[in-house]
Image (cartoon, rainbow, N blue to C red):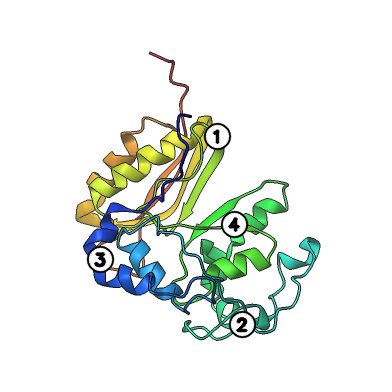
Amino acid sequence: MGENASFTSIGHTCFAMKEELEEYMDYDVGEICNDDWKLAQKLMVHGCDPLPRRRCFSRSPKLYKQPFPVNESLWKLPDDRNVRWSQYQCKNFACLAGNATRLDLSVGTGTFAARMREFNVTIVSANINFGAPFNEMIALRGLVPLYLTINQRLPFFDNTLDLIHTTRFLDGWIDLVLLEFILYDWDRVLRPGGLLWIDSFFCLKVDLYDYLQAFKMLRYKKHKWVVVPKLDKDEQEMFFSVLEKPHRPFR
């Protein structure tokens, strides 16, 4: 490809967070990395993504037990010793399972991927560890976690995915311009005829029209399109949809 050297990729926003980036890169080469994954995640969430690579060994749990076999791991809590809990609000896997709503409805622990696995469908679960080891939990269930923020371009080639599913990942907090970038990127990786499944997108009633227009911009075929009041919040609406990417001829 005309290159005889390698070049490190680094998000341009990293330079706006010089102090945090310098702290992240302050380590001893060949030694154990600092226990600073929360600092790394802070950089990522604020747009410093991808992070520069480092030449140190990542920290591991002191006691690690082999995960359960795949036929057992989907619906069984992993061993608590398989995660370093010091930086989490959660201190064991039981606190994740204890919240029925989170386990049943959120993609945080990979439940959607587990259910699809039972139908022989492989799902990659994109997630961030907000207060709990969601990525570790997904991996220990025998599933595929993807440590990713919404600021990052999806690491998949064009027209290669059959399905993109999101539950409470995009909501009315998101800027409309950022939402457009995300939707165009999703369109890029979905194959023609692929499905975009938006589950539980909620926003203020006054903002509903603008958000719906962003999704309609894709001109996808509607298999499901439902807007209902969100009963536990005032002046909010809930939006559900299953959309199919059309075949677009080359120009």
Real-space Cα distance between discs 1 and 3? 34 Å
| Residue 244 vertical position relative to residue 141 in the rendered view, above or below | above
Tell me the tag on residue 112. Answer: 4
Crowd tier of the residue under label 4, counting other residues whose Cα lies within 10 Å: few below 14, some 14–19, many 20 or above: many
Q: Secondary structure at mark 1?
A: loop
Residue at (48% x, 32% y) in the render: 158
What residue type is disc 3 on? Met
The answer to whether the residues at label 3 and label 4 have Cβ atoms under 8 Å apart is no
Instruction: State which quadrant residue 98 falls in.
Output: bottom right
Helix, strand or loop at label 2? It is helix
Instruction: Provide the secondary structure element on which disc 3 rests.
Output: helix
Question: Percent x, y for residue 124?
Answer: 58, 52
Residue depicted at 61% across the width and 64% down the height: 138
In the figure, is residue 107 to the left or right of 235?
right
- 3 or 2: tag closer to the N-terminus: 3
Q: Disc 2 marks which residue?
A: 94
Q: Secondary structure at mark 4?
A: helix
Q: CA distance from mark 1 to mark 4?
A: 20 Å
Indicate the amino acid at tag 4: Phe
Front disc: 1 or 2: 1
Question: Which callout, 4 or 2, points at the residue further toward the start of the chain?
Answer: 2
Q: Nearer the viewer, residue 140 or 30?
A: 30
> Does the residue at mark 1 contact the one at mark 4 (Cβ under 8 Å)?
no
Furthest-left residue in this view: 206
> Can you identify the residue that label 3 sits on?
17
